[in-house]
């Protein structure tokens, strides 16, 4: 039979394992969502951005090289502006 100290130690260790699993699941979820947004914005930029000037290549480079941060900047800043200018 285990002592009360061993039982408490096992309970604490089990709690840390549970917290670790939740943190890991959250990290996987956030990483997957970020990658989906990144791909979505890259495809959106490649298919709907104007071919005139350097706008398309600039935004593709920003999105490709900065991953999620660039994709979010494009989503928040450029995409609404593009929709107002080009209607697509």
Image: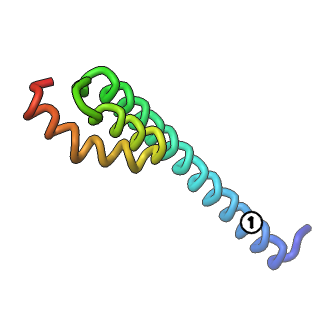
Position of 66 with respect to 74 (left or right) is right
Could you tell me which residue is drawn at 24 percent across and 31 percent down?
53
Residue 56 in the image: above or below residue 74: above
- Residue 42 location, x and y as percent? 38, 31
Measuring from the top left, give residue 46's x and y in whole percent.
34, 25
**Image quadrant in which the C terminus is located:** top left
Q: Is residue 88 above or below residue 54?
A: above
Q: Is residue 59 above or below residue 2?
A: above
Front in this rendered view, residue 38 or 52? 52
Q: Which of the 4 quarters of the picture holds residue 40?
A: top left
- In the visual, does 40 lie left or right of 1? left
The answer to whether 4 is drawn above or below residue 49 in the figure is below
Q: What residue is shown with label 1?
A: 13
Q: Residue at x 66, y 63 (%)?
A: 15
What residue lies at 30% left-to-right and 48% top-to-bottom?
73
Looking at the picture, tell me which residue is in the foreground, 39 or 1.
39
| Pick the front one: 9 or 88 | 88
Q: Nearer the viewer, residue 13 or 85?
A: 85
What crowding class fits label 1: few (fewer than 14 Cα within 10 Å), some (14-19), or many (20 or more)? few
The x and y percentages for residue 30 are: 48, 46
- Residue 6 is drawn in which quadrant? bottom right
Q: Secondary structure at mark 1?
A: helix
Query: Could you tell me which residue is drawn at 88 percent across and 70 percent down?
Result: 2
């Amino acid at each position: 039979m285990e002592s009360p100290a061993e039982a408490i130690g096992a309970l604490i260790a089990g709690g840390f394992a549970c917290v670790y699993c939740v943190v890991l699941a959250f990290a996987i979820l956030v990483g997957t969502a970020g990658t989906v947004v990144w791909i979505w914005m890259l495809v959106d930029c490649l298919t709907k951005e104007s071919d005139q000037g350097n706008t398309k290549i600039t935004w593709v480079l920003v999105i490709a090289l900065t991953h999620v941060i660039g994709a979010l900047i494009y989503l928040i800043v450029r995409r609404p502006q593009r929709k107002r200018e080009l209607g697509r």
